[in-house]
Image: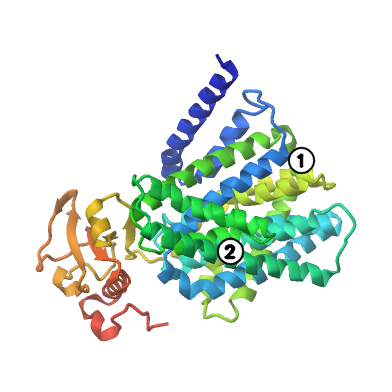
Amino acid sequence: MTPGLDLALLLGAAVLLVAIGAVRFSTRLGVPSLLVYLALGVAIGEAGLGIRFDDAELTRMLGFCALIVIIAEGGLTARWSTLRPVLGLAGALSTIGVLVSIVVVGLVVHLLLGLDWRLALLYGAVLSSTDAAAVFATLRRLRLPPRLVAALEAESGMNDAPVVILVVLLSRTGPVEHPWWFEVFLVGYELGVGAAVGLAAGLAGRFALRRAALPSSGLYPIAAVGFTVLAYAAGAVLHASGFLAVYVAGVLLGNARLPHRQAILGFADGLAWLAQIGLFVLLGLLATPERLHTALVPAVVTGLALLLLARPLSVLVSALPFRVGLREQLFLSWAGLRGAVPIVLATIPLSARVPGADRLFDAVFVLVVIFTVLQAGTLAPAARRLRVTAPAEPAEIRVETAPLERMRADLLQLEVPAGSRLAGVHVDELRLPVGASVTLVLRDGVGFVPGADTRLKTGDSMLIVATAGVRDEAERRLRAVSRRGRLARWFGEYGEDRDG
């Protein structure tokens, strides 16, 4: 008999099932699920069920493990065709933008809260990373232009790497052993080698999984995720950025035509949800509720500095070399969501026993709760107000179907919203490329197979099967018709907005 283990399994299973049920509840209310998970952690902690947990080092280690899985899922599900055009912008946001954010937040915190420079810069460094889990979960529920979504997702997948390096450097408690230029070289080395390791792991995974004849289809998802974890470990052994290696490997694997690709993506998605739930609950468990009220003022001051000064300036500076409009810049500024990552990063100085690290952790915890509610709850209205929505954007549906796998095809869903010029267009006037076809139309709750002369109506929902080779062309064509109607071919076949 193992009563301790039995009780732990009972509590763990109960928390997991409640957390899964909370996803539907939080989606309906528009509240990010991460807040529910944090609340669960607090509820089973000292202030609730009385479980005492204060091991910051263990939390940091488990947090890093969870982030590996979350970032890997983000890379696996990122489409290279939408990621490639924004790599420069995402890279600038993840490097130059991070430095601008650290300096601005550090300056404000130093001046207004009277903290010493190292601790003030730690505030800026910990909060400079956007959270992959929060960004992926929130943005994929909104209909936004692929460019914006890709930029934000790529930034959240890439900026963990330089931020972790900077937080570790600022958390050192001993004497400085190297000149500043050496530290700059070290950051460059870790990022460069990390990207190279991720590239090597991704290419090796593509080669191996395409040629392996594994005895069970369930082994392919495990192997794919295993290659991303291998990328992190290899990068860490070489003293490079393991997080960047994970993301690069994930992108390469996710955009390869691997056997049982849909099963791989579904497995990674489920594993990422499990990592998110475990991570947020653990972070809530580590928090001390009776101490959090003292962190309210520092959290609000720091959060306002981040939201109103640091993030907009970092986006402005990073976007200068690229063609990013003012409305897009404003949305990029508002959509820089923080989540578990800053709280995990706050455990690094906490485990290193940096003076003031406990106050830093409390302030970051409170800040994440307050500003996640504020930002995530207003993203949809902000997108509409800034007119950066794309209601006619097709959304991929992940289904486990062998025929689609054999045909190397994807299943897309497209709705005809009010105001879209898709309304009134016949199916044959969509002029989809060969290899793409509207297979089902759902109208007023009734589904039917459309004919060439079927006229689309506002409120219709379409299922479109598109082979991998023509998917991008089909999406461009649908965007063009949504904007220009049946005469889209005369105004821009590929959906380019020529009105500026």
Q: Element type at marker 2?
A: helix
Relative depth, front residue between 320 and 159: 159
Report the residue marked by disc 1: 294
Residue 160 x/y as whole percent: 62, 58
Residue furthest top in the image: 1
Q: Going 51% across and 46% down the picture, which residue do you hit?
A: 32
Residue 278 x/y as whole percent: 55, 38
Camera-near label (1 vs 2) is 2
Relative depth, front residue between 138 and 88: 88
Q: Element type at marker 1?
A: helix
Residue type (three-letter) at the residue carrying disc 2: Val
Q: Going 50% across and 54% down the picture, which residue do you hit?
A: 227
Residue type (three-letter) at the residue carrying disc 1: Thr
**Residue 180: quarter of image:** bottom right
Q: Is residue 6 left or right of residue 174?
A: left
Q: Which mark is residue 197?
A: 2
Q: Is residue 352 above or below residue 416?
A: above
Number of numbered markers: 2
Q: Is residue 354 left or right of residue 452?
A: right
On the rendered image, what quadrant is the C terminus found in?
A: bottom left
Residue 326 x/y as whole percent: 54, 75
Can residue 369 be seen here? The reply is: no
